[in-house]
Image: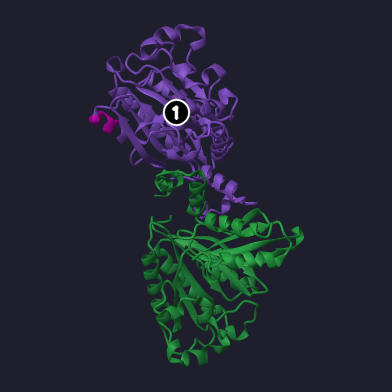
Chain colours: A green, B purple
Amino acid sequence: MLGNKIIQCVPNFSEGRNIEKIDRIIDTLRGKDGVKLLDYSSDKDHNRTVVTLVGDPEGLKEAILDFMAEAIDLIDLREHSGQHPRMGAVDVVPFIPIKNVTMDEAILLSHQVAEEAAARFNLPIFLYEKSAAVPARENLAVIRKGEFEGMKDKLLKEEWKPDFGPGSPHESAGVTAIGARMPLVAFNVNLNTPNLQIADAIAKKVRYIGGGLRFCKAMGVTLEDRNITQVSMNMTDYTKTALYRSFELIKVEARRYGVSVVGSEIVGMLPMQALIDCAEYYLGIENFSSDQILENKLME
Amino acid sequence: MLGNKIIQCVPNFSEGRNIEKIDRIIDTLRGKDGVKLLDYSSDKDHNRTVVTLVGDPEGLKEAILDFMAEAIDLIDLREHSGQHPRMGAVDVVPFIPIKNVTMDEAILLSHQVAEEAAARFNLPIFLYEKSAAVPARENLAVIRKGEFEGMKDKLLKEEWKPDFGPGSPHESAGVTAIGARMPLVAFNVNLNTPNLQIADAIAKKVRYIGGGLRFCKAMGVTLEDRNITQVSMNMTDYTKTALYRSFELIKVEARRYGVSVVGSEIVGMLPMQALIDCAEYYLGIENFSSDQILENKLME
């Protein structure tokens, strides 16, 4: 049974081919008190498995440490190859506040797990995203640059001293990043043009780095089988940059190209509130409280 | 702990003033296995209390029978007065399928409770809404016409023989209606006009009986403190008549009066899907599955 406080955790580990090893690692997350395994999917090309679980802070802490122990035991990065960049047997462990949990509580949990894992596995750990001690460590890609093979030299640099654990990588399990972040929503908006340049131009205006919305990453993508393009987005904080805002802004930008929005898609899971916020906007609902949602009462 | 199958129940009982009696009746619903009391609210003018609880079919059945026993024991309709029409100590008991439950299962539960309650309390019971045996008994207002005081004569008529129980009302507890129905969503759309005739005219076009939407009841209402009016609706099956459809139709009808929609409100609780459906429509989301909602996975 799940507790009242719910945190999501999406650990990525560096094995996507050996089913037996994958099963043994995943098994550490089953039947644990206060934890529920929701999904996992392995990619052979990436040679990587992405797991989704939820739980209360205490349950998650125990489960993730058991999970890390097994992955570190079974995976040897010296023999690992795959398309996805990676630096550790357990590459990254994000904690995401979902229900009755603040970001501060998720950050606290990430610190606790990082400290304990570093001690138990003699593993260097970087705190990233909202848990990062300095801005330079917020971005996972920056931390991971150099990958497993380059970590030994990287950790020698003063600015890349790990937040927890030893000053050199674990021989076979490398380095792990642990942190708290908001839920990501993968939201793609379809355009009735096959012209990728147009989709790209719109993506660049809508996204943060191009002067667009603060919590929106975007790029143009071709949907070959449908002969159309799409603005493919990662909404990195739907509570501040709502989905409808990027949707409407794409319509506005598309207009100048004589292009129309012809649909959208949500890839993977999202918290219900990300869509409730959109319904509230479009229906102009005043004074709505999430307590009015029956399911929220059921989960209390 | 709640089971996997969730039915909502919204019993109404005829006491809204005597706190001690109300507490004793409500107490029968607390701490019951498989049942969760969500809300209750008493109205002194109506002299009536509306309760909201959820549970699995087995748990609900036991809890509702205990609840009815206490209400029938404590309430004497011969001494009852209030603005709201009523015919029983327990006036009406609707069962509403919410999660992993079909309407047929809710109907079955209503039959079981009705049969058992009629035998245990020697109480005449009408099955109404989706549980009704004949169309003439679908509408609660039609069944209740004549109220407590008129039930003795009404039940003597062949067409008003109760579905269960004796052929004359319970001396102090009258008659109860039990049935299954879809969740009601109270959805009001605000217009920037103080002219009630316009709000009423729009309501009449949007609602079923005026040639409008199949599962929409509507009337015009004045919001005096804001000097505007609203189309006040009961959406009686949001799975078939979605909220966005009535909202957009009101905009269309308002146009001919030079009036605009300036907001809306949801009164009370609603299932998340009623709003998710609206977000899906307005964002044009393709191939969306409710499995993508994290909360649905949490409640599985």
Q: Is residue B146 above or below residue A283?
A: above
Q: Magenta segment, principal secondary structure?
A: helix
Q: Quadrant of residue B117?
A: top left
> Disc 1 marks which amino acid?
Asn
- Residue A50 screen position, x and y as percent: 57, 68
Visible in this render: residue A247? yes
Say whether residue A100 is left or right of residue A38: left
Residue at position x 45%, y 33% in the image: B193
Say whether residue A191 is left or right of residue B256: right
Say whether residue A279 is left or right of residue B285: left
- Residue B95 screen position, x and y as percent: 47, 32
Q: Nearer the viewer, residue B109 or B182?
A: B182
Q: Residue furthest front?
A: B258
Residue A189 colored magenta?
no
Residue B24 colored magenta?
yes
Residue at position x 39%, y 58% in the image: A5
Q: Is residue A64 above or below residue A100?
A: below
Q: Nearer the viewer, residue A51 or B193?
A: B193
Element carrying mark 1: loop
- Residue A228 screen position, x and y as percent: 72, 59
Q: Which residues are magenta?
A: B19-25
Task: Count how many numbered circles sit on residues in the image.
Answer: 1
> Which chain does the numbered disc 1 sit on?
B
Q: Which residue is mark 1?
A: B195
Q: Nearer the viewer, residue A289 or A76?
A: A289
Residue at position x 62%, y 82% in the image: A80
- Residue B7 screen position, x and y as percent: 48, 38
Visible in this render: residue B55? no
Q: Is residue B258 above or below residue A119?
A: above
